[in-house]
Amino acid sequence: MIQVIKFFIRASGQVFARTSEGVVWICRGIQAWLQLSLRQDKVKLTDSAGCRNIIQAKVVQRPGSEAQLKNLIPPFESRAKPNKRLVHAFGINNCFTTAEPQRCTTFRLEATRLIRLRGPEWKELSQTVLQVVKHSVPLQTQAKSNLFNLMQIVTMKSILGPLCGFDSSRSDVDGELQTLAKEINRQWLDSKEGLEKETEFANQPKLKSALKAIAPTWDGLDDTHNPLNFILPGYETLWRVVLRGFLEVMYRANERDSANWRHALEDFALNPTLAQLDKVHTDYGKVSTCMIVEETLRLYPPTRRIYRTFKVAEDEEFEAAADIEGLHRSAAAWGNDALFFNPSRWADKVNDTNFRNDNFMPFGTKPFTCVAKTGLVNEAREKCLPFGVSIIAILLGCFSAEVPAGMTPGGGGADGTWSTDQPLKTGREDYRDVMIGY
């Protein structure tokens, strides 16, 4: 509805000066309202079975009904349809936007190859991230930095190495990378207003120019080689998780827990191995790095809702949403403290496969499980670190190591929110004006 109000405000300023232009804006407002009305979820499910069925895109069950309605649309098309706006806005062609199984298979194989890092590669990546954080965090006692921008630029540079072969130690293109992060965020929000010509990827000179900094040989036209194919599912789902994990560990926990969790994360960043990831630190409150990251993913899943298009009759087609955030915050599954950040809750769930499969879906579920979920086997038949959990742990560990305890966030609507008994806000623009400093 906010988008519609914007249209009518713009129209009111035009209608008296140029009646025809005002009418155009009013018509566009009506069009946006219709699009938003159609976008409203006809089905939104929070329970485990309902979320799994929606993600698999084969059957759907309306709330309050036991009847399972068969989807007449193939699963890949069912996933691709809600993401048409991303094709329009970013010119991408990846596993999330294609209805062709073979294209999805090709993309997954390439993504798997890129994130299947060996032990020395993980150590090199962690050292690079640490240097990026050192370069980005303000050192002067009088200096302040925008926390929102800080998380974006560090996360962006951290994933560009593995996903795009970019030298993340470079600082000469930080301006372009910050522009890239801002343009992705702006374009993502604008794309929700509909498939307007203004939001089409071809009409985004700032975004395309920023992409040239990391992919100078890309012609800007070939959608299968668009660097955003990998950047969006990597960076876009990651930085918001890292931001909230950072705030929980550094500023919302009590002093003892914060110190324990920071030690565990910093130890992993120094030695990113499978053993270190799962090591339960008896001196650090009996938690492991993996438990801290999984609690972050539980309370702040990378994708709050996963959408599929269902066609259950020739004249009935609608979108359904698997409410992953709701599933992860269910008191029935997670207890009365489900809204609290508590890594210790994972102590008895580490090896409970059935519970995890039913109640923890930050990386989706079969057959559309994200390749970043589990550890892979490399060419030397060595088991690799799971990319998703590990890159979050490294980012949090490096931030913990380089952000002094005396440096605190404030402003931008954040003051007073650290001691509340509710989770942090999860809107895309929340905390964008928060500054961090002494």
Image: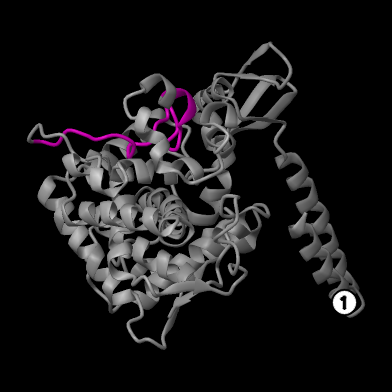
Q: Quadrant of the C terminus?
A: bottom left
- What secondary structure is the magenta-colored segment mainly? loop
In the displayed structure, 151 sits above or below 235; it is: below
Image point (27%, 76%), residue name: 171
Q: Position of residue 271 (x, y in %)?
A: 16, 52
In the picture, measured across the screen, residue 4 lies left or right of residue 279, that is right
> Who is closer to the viewer here, 21 or 67?
67
In the picture, measured across the screen, residue 397 lies left or right of residue 193, that is left
In the displayed structure, 315 sits above or below 138; it is: above
- SS state under label 1: loop
| Residue ID for mark 1 | 18
Q: Quadrant of residue 170?
A: bottom left
Image point (72%, 15%), residue name: 65
In the picture, measured across the screen, residue 15 lies left or right of residue 58, that is right
> Who is closer to the viewer here, 138 or 157?
138
Image point (37%, 28%), residue name: 348
In the image, the segment drawn in magenta is 357-379
In the displayed structure, 146 sits above or below 303; it is: below
Q: Position of residue 243 (x, y in %)?
A: 45, 59
Image point (33%, 64%), residue name: 399
Q: Position of residue 307 (x, y in %)?
A: 58, 36
> Who is closer to the viewer here, 133 or 200?
133
Q: Residue furthest left?
A: 380
Q: Residues within 10 Å of mark 1 (few under 14, many from 20)?
A: few
